[in-house]
Image (tube, grey):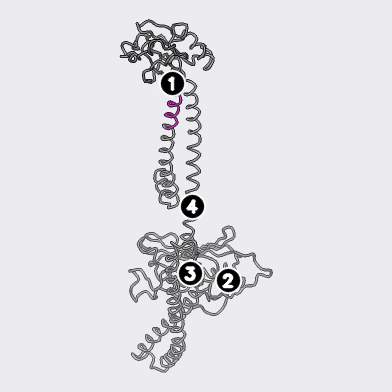
């Protein structure tokens, strides 16, 4: 599971989405914490301001205990019923006597824990000099009493949070506490809202990061699709440049110029191979005829006839090579056009098995051919594929070995398996068996005829028939190749061209 997750992390799109989500999540978390602190401080300032406004006015007109009873009634009218515990009020006189204490004053909060006006250091303002004698007394309200600065603190009492403000004047110390339960409920609602909004925002950010990564990677995806479609017929494909993708413009132009060079080089190589094969065909054919006549005219069994015979064999090998190169050049350029017609491949393989038995009577042929299987193919080209595979079974077999030819139908396809006993193909060389001019080290000698073009040409022919040729089981003592071709329904009359001109000897 961990390996699967790590493999997914190799996706650039997923990494972009995760990175954008992590960065945005960190910024969002910092913003949420900052907002939470700002809201909390704003609530405390609002509560402190409320306490200040409620306490400051009564302190400016000091009275006796009845005055604070009326203040408590006013606060109850403004803040709510005492049963709801919205506030508590405590008034302490100059001599330390409690002038008023709310009925719901918390028992855990001692009333003697607050300073009296004398202990707080309150002093009377300096006496003002009275008016001159004979001056009529001044009418109006008495001058206000000076109050002390308000101090605040938060206390947890009886499982509840209280915001308490302490303020006084030279005669009275007043303590007013407001229950923070309504504000805590408000903060709880905000917390729940954030718990829903933040994950939703992160999901939206992740989806947005995925979408942006998808759009940003479109040029890369276009490069990938074009690279995947680079085949011999598809070398003319190019990636269109887009004005909105300025960052990828240079990469796309470089890639297109590389395709231009690759196309030119490939066409030059194909033309050279085709031209060379075509130009060599005529002189080699003439040379083959001349040598054949010379062999016939030489003294039978003489050294001259043996030399001419060896030269004739080499010329025939060169003719086979030029024919294969010509077919491969046609396949590379996409011009290998098989002449398709219905073929009874069962009959063709039965004949191939009989040929193997005649050519190599020391081998044991084990045919397992399902009768009356038909494909649409070029008979000459398909025969070359069959002859190549069976010839390899003969050449790379062991003395007294066996050759297996199996043909069966699998769904809509015909499955051909050709295997032989032998040393097998090493694991390090299995990926190269279809390379041109490649031969395993054990075959790099003239004792085994061939140049390493047969399997490559056979695969190109099979692919031209919309099939596939692959290396099947290959181990010590056994090697097999698998051919898959589309199957067709047997035509009316059952006619076929399984017999025809002799195929080209292949290696």
Q: Determine whether the residue tagged by mark 1 lies in a helix, strand or loop.
A: helix
Instruction: Please give the label number shown on residue 298.
Output: none
In front: 335, or 225? 225
Q: Earlier in the sequence, mark 4 or mark 2?
A: 4
**Residue 173 in the image: above or below residue 351:** above
**Residue 60 in the image: above or below residue 186:** above
Q: Badge 3 is on which residue?
A: 231
Q: Badge 1 is on which residue?
A: 52
The answer to whether marks 2 and 1 mark residues whose Cβ atoms lie closer than 8 Å is no
Is residue 317 visible in the rendered structure shown here? yes
The residue depicted at 37 percent of the width and 87 percent of the height is 311
> Gap in Å between the C-alphas at discs 1 and 3?
85 Å
Q: Badge 2 is on which residue?
A: 377
The answer to whether marks 1 and 3 mark residues whose Cβ atoms lie closer than 8 Å is no
Is residue 507 visible in the rendered structure shown here? no
Location of residue 223 in the rendering, given as x and y in whole percent from the top left corner:
46, 63
Q: Give the magenta-colored segment's residue range.
A: 38-50
Q: Badge 4 is on which residue?
A: 212
> Gap in Å between the C-alphas at discs 4 and 2?
49 Å
Local packing at callout 3 (Cα closer than 10 Å; few below 14, some 14-19, many 20+) is some
The answer to whether marks 3 and 2 mark residues whose Cβ atoms lie closer than 8 Å is no
> Gap in Å between the C-alphas at discs 2 and 1?
100 Å
Residue 380: quadrant of the picture: bottom right
Screen quadrant of the N terminus: top left
Mark 1 or mark 3: which is in front?
Answer: 1
**Residue 85 in the image: above or below residue 204:** above
In front: 412, or 60? 60
Q: Determine whether the residue tagged by mark 4 lies in a helix, strand or loop.
A: helix
Q: Determine whether the residue tagged by mark 3 lies in a helix, strand or loop.
A: loop
Mark 1 or mark 4: which is in front?
Answer: 1
């Amino acid at each position: 599971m961990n390996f699967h997750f790590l493999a997914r992390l190799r996706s650039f799109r997923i990494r972009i989405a995760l990175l954008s989500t992590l960065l945005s999540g960190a910024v969002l978390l910092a913003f949420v914490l900052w907002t939470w602190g700002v809201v909390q401080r704003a609530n405390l300032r609002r509560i402190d301001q409320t306490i200040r406004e409620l306490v400051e006015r009564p302190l400016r007109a000091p009275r006796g205990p009845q005055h604070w009873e009326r203040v408590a009634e006013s606060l109850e009218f403004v803040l709510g019923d005492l049963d709801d515990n919205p506030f508590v009020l405590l008034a302490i006189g100059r001599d330390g006597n409690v002038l008023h204490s709310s009925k719901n004053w918390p028992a855990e909060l001692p009333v003697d824990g607050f300073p009296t006006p004398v202990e707080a250091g309150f002093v009377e303002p300096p006496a003002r000099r009275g008016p001159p004698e004979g001056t009529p007394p001044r009418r109006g309200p008495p001058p206000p009493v000076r109050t002390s600065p308000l101090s605040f603190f938060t206390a947890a009492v009886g499982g509840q949070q209280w915001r308490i403000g302490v303020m006084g004047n030279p005669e009275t110390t007043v303590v007013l506490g407001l229950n923070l339960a309504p504000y805590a409920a408000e903060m709880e609602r905000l917390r729940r809202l954030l718990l829903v909004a933040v994950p939703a925002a992160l999901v939206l950010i992740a989806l947005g990061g995925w979408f942006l990564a998808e759009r940003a990677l479109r040029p890369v995806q276009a490069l990938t699709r074009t690279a995947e479609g680079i085949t011999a017929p598809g070398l003319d494909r190019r990636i269109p440049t887009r004005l909105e993708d300025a960052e990828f413009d240079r990469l796309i132009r470089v890639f297109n110029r590389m395709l231009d060079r690759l196309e030119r080089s490939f066409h030059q190589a194909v033309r050279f191979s085709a031209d060379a094969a075509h130009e060599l065909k005529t002189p080699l054919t003439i040379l083959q005829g001349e040598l054949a006549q010379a062999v016939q005219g030489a003294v039978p069994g003489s050294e001259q006839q043996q030399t001419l015979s060896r030269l004739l064999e080499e010329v025939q090998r060169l003719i086979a090579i030029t024919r294969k190169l010509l077919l491969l050049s046609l396949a590379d350029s996409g011009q290998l056009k098989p002449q398709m017609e219905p073929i009874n491949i069962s009959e063709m393989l039965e004949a191939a098995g009989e040929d193997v038995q005649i050519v190599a009577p020391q081998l044991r042929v084990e045919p397992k051919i399902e009768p009356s299987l038909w494909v649409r193919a070029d008979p000459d080209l398909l025969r070359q594929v069959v002859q190549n595979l069976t010839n390899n079974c003969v050449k790379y077999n062991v003395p007294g070995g066996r050759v297996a030819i199996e043909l069966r139908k699998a769904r809509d396809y015909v499955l051909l398996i050709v295997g032989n006993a032998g040393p097998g193909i090493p694991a390090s060389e299995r990926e190269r068996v279809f390379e041109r001019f490649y031969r395993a080290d054990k075959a790099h000698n003239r004792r085994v005829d061939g140049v390493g073009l047969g399997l490559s040409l056979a695969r190109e022919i099979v692919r031209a028939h919309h099939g596939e040729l692959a290396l099947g089981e290959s181990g010590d003592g056994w090697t097999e190749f698998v051919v898959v071709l589309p199957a067709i329904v047997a035509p009316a009359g059952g006619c076929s061209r399984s017999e025809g001109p002799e195929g080209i000897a292949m290696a």
